[in-house]
Image (cartoon, rainbow, N blue to C red):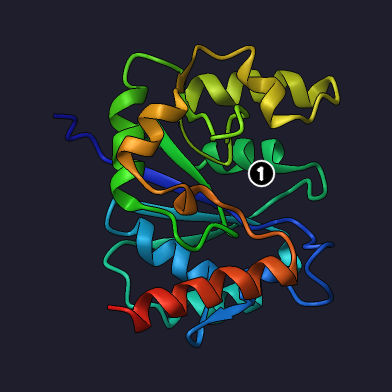
């Protein structure tokens, strides 16, 4: 079993354009901001968490995350080049990381399964990335594990060429795609679901409330 230290980057630098005027990372579920839910869940799977965001987001994130009773350090990493998408956020964050591999999880996945993140770390060994395939056949690079050094090299080259697609970067990495059938055996599809709109947020949190009420 892999016992190397593990790091995770939470991607939170987007503009939440489909969510309304509120930063969706700060939308509360049971009184706790969504970004805190993600970070709290990841804390049981990794040894350090970095939050990639725009500089103007940092004060609000500091307030929310400083109140989180996490067992691992959580650090804010403002993106020196905002508005260039998740690949840029990953590269700038990975440059602050010393571990061989790091998980990447979007801030709008509040039901991320830490056991599945651990599974992705195990699967990534010997590859540049381990990326789950969704039930619609698409891959989910915003909840995946990457080899830090190689991802920085490829990412820097692509960003210099103004090729900003994170999915595009997978084609230049030795990427292990976890088949959808395997993913469904390891976790629920809900754990990989990202919340983009206010309607999705209401529906997903209502589902969460219903699940708790039924327990």
- Residue at the extreme bottom: 31
Q: Which residue is at a point 56% across and 24% down the rendered structure image?
A: 151
Left/right of residue 111 with respect to residue 35 in the rendered view: left
Looking at the image, the residue that sits furthest to the front is 214
Q: Position of residue 89 (x, y in %)?
A: 66, 44
Q: Residue at x 57, y 81 (%)?
A: 28
- Tell me if 10 is positioned left or right of 156 in this view: left
Q: Is residue 46 among what the camera can see? A: no
Q: Vertically, is 58 above or below 97?
A: below
Answer left or right for 159 relative to 5.
Answer: right
Measuring from the top left, give residue 8's x and y in whole percent: 43, 47
Front one among 137 and 142: 137
Q: Position of residue 98 (x, y in %)?
A: 39, 36
Residue occupying the point 31% across, 20% down: 125
Secondary structure at numbered mark 1: helix
- Pinpoint residue 201: horizontal percent, then vertical percent: 64, 70
Relative to 185, is 80 above or below? below
Front one among 36 and 91? 36
Left or right for 38, reference 4: right
Q: Quickly name the residue at label 1.
A: 89
215 is higher (above) or lower (below) than 83:
below
Instruction: List the single residue furthest toward the left.
Output: 1
Point out the image quarter for the C terminus.
bottom left
Quadrant including the N terminus:
top left
């Amino acid at each position: 079993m892999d016992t190397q230290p593990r790091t995770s980057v939470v991607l939170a630098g987007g503009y939440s354009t489909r969510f309304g005027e509120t930063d969706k990372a700060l939308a509360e579920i049971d009184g706790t901001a969504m970004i805190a839910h993600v970070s709290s869940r990841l804390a049981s799977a990794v040894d350090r968490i970095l939050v990639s965001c725009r500089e103007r987001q940092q004060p609000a994130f500091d307030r929310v995350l400083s109140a989180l009773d996490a067992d691992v350090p959580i650090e804010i990493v403002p993106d020196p080049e905002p508005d260039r998408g998740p690949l840029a956020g990953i590269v700038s964050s990975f440059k602050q990381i010393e571990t061989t591999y790091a998980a990447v999880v979007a801030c709008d996945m509040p039901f991320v399964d830490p056991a599945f993140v651990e599974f992705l770390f195990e699967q990534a060994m010997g590859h540049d990335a381990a990326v789950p395939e969704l039930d619609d056949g698409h891959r989910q690079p915003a909840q995946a594990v990457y080899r830090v050094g190689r991802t920085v090299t490829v990412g820097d080259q692509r960003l210099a060429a103004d090729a900003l697609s994170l999915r595009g970067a997978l084609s230049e990495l030795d990427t292990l795609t976890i088949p959808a059938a395997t993913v469904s055996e390891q976790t629920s599809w809900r754990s990989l679901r990202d919340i983009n709109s206010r309607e999705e947020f209401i529906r997903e949190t209502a589902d969460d409330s219903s699940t708790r009420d039924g327990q």
